[in-house]
Image: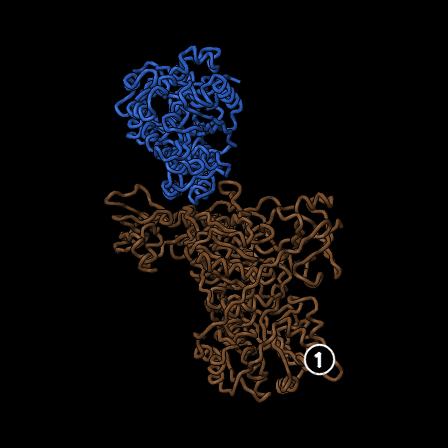
Amino acid sequence: MSKLTPVLSANWDQADSFTIEGYKRSGGYKAIKSALEKTPDEVIQLVKDSGLRGRGGAGFPTGMKWGFIPQGDNKEHYLVVNADESEPGTCKDMPLLMANPHVLVEGIIIGSYAIRANHAFIYIRGEVAHVVRRVQEAIAEAYKAGFLGKNILGKGFDLDLTLHVGAGAYICGEETALLDSLEGFRGQPRLRPPFPAIAGLYARPTVVNNVESIASVPSIINNGVEWFQSMGTEKSKGYTLYSLSGHVANPGQFEAPLGITLRELLELAGGIRPGHQIKFWTPGGSSTPMFTAEHLDVPLDYEGVGAAGSMLGTKALQIFDETTCVVRAALRWTEFYKHESCGKCTPCREGTWWLVQMLHDLEDGKGSEEDLAKLLDLCDNIAGRSFCALADGAVAPIISSLKYFRDEYLAHQKNGGCPFDPMKSTKFEMAGI
Amino acid sequence: MSTEQLTEVEMITCVIDGFEVTVPKGTLVIRAAEKLGIQIPRFCDHPLLSPAGACRQCLVDVEINGRAFPKPQASCTIPVETGMIVKTQLTSPVADKAQKGIMELLLINHPLDCPVCDKGGECPLQNQAMSNGRESSRYEGKKRTYDKPVAISTQVLLDRERCVLCARCTRFSEEIAGDPFITLNERGALQQVGIYEKDPFQSYFSGNTVQICPVGALTGASYRFRARPFDLVSVDSACEHCASGCAMRTDIRRGKTLRRLAGNDASVNEEWNCDKGRWAFKYLTTRERVSTPMVRGEDGELHEASWPEAIAAAAAGLKGKRAGVLVGGRVTREDAYGYSKFARVALGTNDIDFRARPHTDEETSFLSSIALDLKTTYADLDKADHVVLVEFEPEEESPIVFLRLYKQSRKRSLKVSTTAARISRGNHKLGAVRVALSSVSDLTAKSVILVGERAAESAGALSTAVALAEKSGAKLAWIPRRAGERGALEMGAISTLLPGGRPVSDASARVDLAAAWGVDSLPTTPGRTTSEILEALNKEDELEAVLVGGVDPMDISADALSQLLNTFVVSLEISHSSVTAIADVVLPVAAVVEKRGSFADWQGSVHSFDKAQADALSRSDVRILTMLSEAMGKSINLPTVSATEREIASLGKWDGAKINFAPIASGSAPHAEGNHANLTSWRLLLDLGTLQEGEANLAGTARIARAHISSKRAGDLGVANGDLVKVSNDRGSLTLPVVIIDIADDSIWVPRNSLNSQVIPTLGFSSGIVTVVKA
């Protein structure tokens, strides 16, 4: 169980893993051949049967999402890949696209074929110019090889793939804001219904999938449903990328079956940085309520993390040791959400504005016990009241940190400021510089 | 119609706060609650705009068939469903807390400047903060501040810190007006309403954004800091500008009109109006009002006179003379009736015409035969499969007609065709295509042909439109530009018709009316039109005197004023004008806000209004005409507007034989070659019209006058966009910047009455051949 299961990352140690030759050498572009032999509905059924769930955070069954697209409606369909990875701590899609962009391209071809789309889009965050170049090159190679364009593999299937570079807004990772942005508008979430499956990009039936979800499809086609189901837990099948960052000895990507625990992952990553103990961690990016040392054995699958009071999210495990001030961490995250709030709805726009000011005061030791009650009440007035999930994510670190570290908040007041030395939590402090 | 509609709509029953309510499928929860009298607080919600769900103020608890939503839902975005149970703030502590929480958040960055804010006292934020907010704020942080105000146009000012970012204004501009010139910029708490760099908010409908702003973020430049809402007395009124028929609200403080707002009339203007209707009312006070009667003395100057003196002087000049009556298109129905009766009874003539604009016999025939029987309405536009615009520019000449068309254009790509020489901005928004009227062939009974008053300027256009409607069964409507024309026609302020559409030529109609009026007989001699009256004034043995209502001679022709010079003129006016300057007797009359009356819109629907400025002393035209007729010994017996209303009602409409329309053959457009061009023009909504005087902020959004030419002509002249050309004939010339557009190579278009482009006074005509050269 604790063994790694490299699939997407299997060829990352190859010098040319990102080229079409490198990808083909490790078995790439085989899956499209067998996928295009099947009918689109058979492909959808296969993905449904595999139990693959969305790797972008919500864990919605991918095959079911594809199945929502109305068939035979004589409308254009679109597949849109969400590569706008920008959640603090989340760092799986960018390394994947850097090292193995073709697995996404192959997945897109299969996914588009299944949902009968002839045009697919990758919406990638704009800050990662190096990854953008890699993906661009991969698309060009795929066109050259005849995997994209007209009459792919002589099977009469046409597909164009467009790479769209975002302009630096976290909200564009929200699927409907992404669609607005892709259409050339300012990225703000859309009112649902209509859902993208009915009226998405250009008001046409659209599937929006995470990079890793789509990239997982070729392996399912190649190895079959049983192989995929042999990994993972009852309701969370397959393998996935866990991204460990922060105060661990060897941070990075760990591809393992769903349901692995942080204790096991930490063993693989060489443990917490020497001389320190784990204090708190996020299971799936900053918007998932934090865990502590008592959660080290929580199975990291959709159900396990949910049952423990958080969300699997993007499996971005940010590890913080005892040198970290949780108030400081919560404030920094909240500042991020305040900056990234799109402004459309009141609770998120005004709430994050207020939260940052309150947390600043608390960090400066100006808060009181009543302020903590006020802070929690404010979070209650924001969570579940906003237009999209951004604000829910914004209050998650505050509520969860107060749950586990209430005394630390109060210590700031007693101390007249932060009792921690922030230098001690930095990596370079350890390096002795 | 109603039963057909009722069976079509599926009704849904749900429960709100324990009460059952049945509403049509698709009704939003917030609206269903209103039906029960349950007011859920809201900011972004507006019944005529698409749901946004942005402010989150209207959160309620919802369950459907026993399954509860995990979190409160925005009641402005979810439609009711069978089996839905809704708990509002009245019954759900969660919804109540959610609403109070949102209200507190809305207020953290909102300034406490209510005492100096225009909206204070009529502010949804203020009111709902009291009804659905916390007692006090827990916010101790720093408020967001901005420079203020920002002028997003000359008429609309923006105070960004007051804005709650509900997006009502931006949705209105995009969805209703089709002018997406304002948008939300930036993000997070710095999100703000803005314009594109230096492009101001040049929309004819921008004032509506001020009216629907739920806070004081958008204010009208002309009203800002002028009044407190609780000092105003609001009176329902009707708009006096165009024939759209908008319901209006006039707000008066201490006898002075301070602002006008769009009223609600679902069958006409819904809740909108145009900026001219909203802001063009300073004409009341701008020019020097005629405050007392005046009589021209032997010294040739006008002198103030008492009413008896002036009435006597006017009566002496008119009594026993052959006189005509020029009414103008801006009178109320009641005043028009007064003029009509005055002409027939006191002057014994049919020489009366309301048309202070180019007109023809073809139009006279159309108006006396068909126009009053047209039953086309706004509802027909909503259902139309194709709308043909004949010499009619909806956005410029009847803006609410434009909004209706745009609504259908947006909703279902309504097909619109136009006979215009070029596609205007408004028609571009409608997706209109240019057609030759004679080649239109695909009309059905659901099609609508909208004919403008300018059809009279194009020989045969009315005849072709009538024939087209008859052949296809399409509905026909005549949409004059001025508010009073349709009513004046109904009241017989035209040579061919008596009040109620009674033909002058019909003996039984004359007998009927003579009996009703208690006179021996009515004149039988066919009357003259406006231009014929003007010509007859200067001919021996024809007309000797003229009674002029609110007419600007320059609207008729370049020569009209001089034609009035050598005759006895009685002028009924609100302000000094070119006519009062030459009149022998000037009698002051009440402006619209100072009197009771009514206008008939283009559909024929009557919009009555009461005196808004209750303490105004001015008298309506009809009262003065009665005094004058009494002095002439031939009383028209209409001492008050109310008495006039009663007499109009008792007369009813003519149900006897109608005059037959006499169609004529279409003329061909004059051919132009080389430097010559066939000039066409129409009035822009905002221009140099008299009723827009004194409102600089409004004028600031008027479109700049440009000469529109084809790329071929531009090439021949060697001019590019923005270069100046001289448009001239033997009477005068206009020098205008050009804009190169899709227009016939032999044509040129210029605005008719805009700054630097007053076509009739300068060129002497409204359309014809001109010479175009590079200036």
Which one is in front, B224 or B279? B279
Q: Is residue A291 above or below residue B108?
A: above
Q: Amino acid at mark 1?
A: Glu
Is residue B278 shown to the viewer in this render? no
Circle 1 packing at 10 Å, graded few (<14), some (14-19), many (20+), is few
Colour chain A appears in:
blue
Q: Quadrant of residue A372?
A: top left
Q: Is residue B285 above or below residue B751?
A: below
Point 35% across, 56% down: residue? B39
Mark 1 residue element: loop
Q: Residue furthest left?
A: B66
Percent position of residue B563, x then y: 70, 73
Colour chain B appears in:
brown
Which one is in front, A214 or B573? B573
Percent position of residue B740, x then y: 66, 46
Point 43% across, 79% down: residue? B650
